[in-house]
Image (spheres, grey):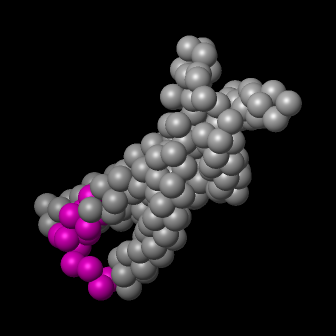
Amino acid sequence: MKKYKISMTKIIYIFTFLILFSCVNDKENKINTLQVKLHNLTQNSLEMNPQKVVDAYQGFKENLILVRDCVDTLENEFAQRMNNYKGLKKACPQFLRTYELTKRDLESQSIQIQNFKQDINNKLIPTDSVFYYLELEENNVQKIADNVINLIDLYEFINAVNDSLYEPIKKYAENICSNKEV
């Protein structure tokens, strides 16, 4: 029987290789995870329809003019509805601004992650710095994720308010206007 003689240096080389190989896979996995997360965030933001917000805001402005022109005194229930409806005054422009910024952030971050991955593959980033840069990219993606979540909440608020209050307020104001004309 032959005994296999493995020197200590060979063991060190093997462990070093395994550690480096696992680090490369870990880095690549994290970058791939960031790319998937960005893709999902992009899909979520694409599901929102900014035109629906523009239409809601336009309807809000039209109803507000109608209410100002026709409604002298407000019933308590209608006044409460109007106060809720006026939330669209700030929410719609805020959504449109945030939507455009988030869309731009998603696009630039996707490019940034692709460039980062290429820089790693081309060994342009020192190995000891990769995890630092990876952490920065993870933080950037998390900020974008937080913005998308806030944007979705704002979008749902706008749609809920518009869906529940646009028609009742419009009908009420039109009814008051038609009664004044008689």
Count of picture labels: 0
Location of residue 7 (image quadrant): bottom left
User: Which of the two residues, 46 or 89, is positioned nearer the viewer here?
Assistant: 89
Q: Is residue 167 visible?
A: no
Residue at the (68%, 48%) spot, across then down:
62
Residue at the (34%, 59%) spot, across then down:
140
Q: Compared to 173, does 142 lie above or below?
A: below
Q: Provide residue 156's location: percent of width, then percent of height.
A: 60, 37
Residue at the (51%, 45%) spot, across then down:
89
Instruction: Farthest residue to the left: give it.
Output: 8
Q: Provide residue 164's location: percent of width, then percent of height.
A: 69, 27
Does residue 175 appear to the left or right of 21 in the view shown? right
User: Which of the two residues, 145 or 113, is positioned nearer the viewer here?
Assistant: 145
Instruction: Farthest residue to the front: give it.
Output: 182
Does residue 134 appear to the left or right of 106 in the view shown? left
Q: Provide residue 168's location: percent of width, then percent of height.
A: 74, 27
Magenta: main secondary structure: helix
Residue at the (58%, 58%) spot, across then down:
42
Answer whether residue 134 is magenta in the image.
Answer: yes
Q: Which residues are magenta?
A: 123-135
Q: Compared to 125, does 62 lie above or below?
A: above
Quadrant (top left, top right, bottom left, bottom right) of the C terminus: top right
User: Which of the two residues, 5 or 10, is positioned nearer the viewer here?
Assistant: 10
Q: Is residue 177 visible?
A: yes
